[in-house]
Image (cartoon, coloured by chain):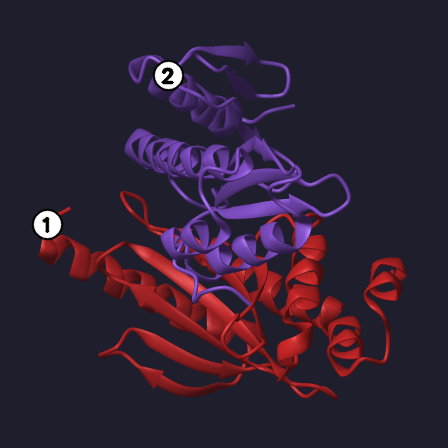
């Protein structure tokens, strides 16, 4: 059962997405807002949710899948370079399937979360996702090389 | 946020972590209020490690970073990166990272306090998550870094 605070947080998420004109489907049972791809306007699908178990706001997205142009070794190096420097959020690689996820969380335990905090959380996650999607879609098509992706994400050069 | 408001918010975040560190009793080796930085170490253990809590006033972020006291050799850094990804996939908050330049392994947790101060509860949770997660995985990372186990054996370790 969600608390009043969690329901309020979920409403903040939905209001912010509506104001940003991001198309999403509500799942009020689990407090998920499933954002859908919308052409060039919003090229990734992702979920914003209130995680009641851990008491975190979270953003999850599967935004790329590795292929013959992007081996798991390179993807792992890129994820490490990004995760070491990103002020928020992280890239997750499923090393068995080559799937590339983005995840960002914010703890709301004991905090009076405002709508501007939620808006900032969503805005930051969307900006990162769009940046990563552009880079990774070029990379998995073989249009952008490994070194360029690494440099763009703050890495030190190829290993 | 205005510069003054940012400075005040950063100071509040620093004070909250000061309190959280004293409640969790992690030894603080050096407290630098001017740099908004704590240099800490874990409690007695066979393999204690250092961690830092820093407040980034311009971006309104608190960053907790722990460093394991060993590193991957240059020829094993890619295995280290894959191992970090494997672990991160099942970790809810924070991320293991292998530094590409030197092979050192860190674990990083960030939290924003923009428009909303970090509570004492959330600060304690950050510190405890960092230490518990690193303690849980440090042995198998050490075995992999030393070459005592292969990458495939690392994946099989519970």
Residue with the mark numbered 1? B2
Q: Residue A16 sits in which quadrant?
A: top left
Give the label on residue B75, or none: none
| Residue for point 62% across, 42% down | A54
Closer-to-camera residue (A44/B110): A44
Task: Please provide percent x and percent y for residue A150.
Answer: 45, 55
Q: Residue B133 sits in which quadrant?
A: bottom right
Residue B61 makes an appearance in the image: yes
Image colour for chain B is red
Closer-to-camera residue (A117/B96): B96
Closer-to-camera residue (A8/B90): B90
Residue with the mark numbered 2? A40
Q: Which chain contains the residue that carries disc 2?
A: A
| Residue for point 14% across, 53% down | B5
Circle 2 residues within 10 Å: few <14, some 14–19, many ≥20? few
| Residue for point 52% across, 70% down | B100
Which chain did the image draw in purple?
Answer: A
Label 2's element?
loop
Task: Please provide percent x and percent y for residue B98.
Answer: 58, 68
Closer-to-camera residue (B39/B90): B90
Residue B126's place in the image compared with A92, above or below, is below
Residue A32's place in the image compared with A64, above or below, is above
């Amino acid at each position: 059962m969600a608390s009043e605070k969690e329901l309020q947080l979920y409403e903040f998420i939905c209001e912010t997405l509506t104001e940003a004109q991001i198309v999403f489907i509500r799942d009020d049972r689990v407090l998920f807002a499933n954002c859908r791809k919308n052409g060039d306007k919003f090229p990734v699908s992702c979920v914003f949710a209130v995680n009641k178990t851990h008491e975190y706001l979270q953003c999850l997205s599967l935004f790329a899948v590795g292929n013959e142009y992007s081996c798991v070794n390179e993807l792992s190096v890129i994820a490490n370079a990004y995760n070491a420097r990103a002020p928020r959020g992280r890239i997750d690689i499923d090393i068995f399937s080559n799937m590339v996820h983005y995840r960002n969380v914010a703890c709301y335990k004991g905090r009076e979360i405002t709508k501007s905090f939620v808006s900032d959380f969503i805005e930051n996650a969307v900006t990162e996702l769009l940046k990563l999607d552009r880079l990774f879609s070029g990379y998995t098509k073989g249009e952008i090389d490994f070194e360029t992706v690494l440099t763009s994400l703050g890495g030190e050069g190829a290993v | 946020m205005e510069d003054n408001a940012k400075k005040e918010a950063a100071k509040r975040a620093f004070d909250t972590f000061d309190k959280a560190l004293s409640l969790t009793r992690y030894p603080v080796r050096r407290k630098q209020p001017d740099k908004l930085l704590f240099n800490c170490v874990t409690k007695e253990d066979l393999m204690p490690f250092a961690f830092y809590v820093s407040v980034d006033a311009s971006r309104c972020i608190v960053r907790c970073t722990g460093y394991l006291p060993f590193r991957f050799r240059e020829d094993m850094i890619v295995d280290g990166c894959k191992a970090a990804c494997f672990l991160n996939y099942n970790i809810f908050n924070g991320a293991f990272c292998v530094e590409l330049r030197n092979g050192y392994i860190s674990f990083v947790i960030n939290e924003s306090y923009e428009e909303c101060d970090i509570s004492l509860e959330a600060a304690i949770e950050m510190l405890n998550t960092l230490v518990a997660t690193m303690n849980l995985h440090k042995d198998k990372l050490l075995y992999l870094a030393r070459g005592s186990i292969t990458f495939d054996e690392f994946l099989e370790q519970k």
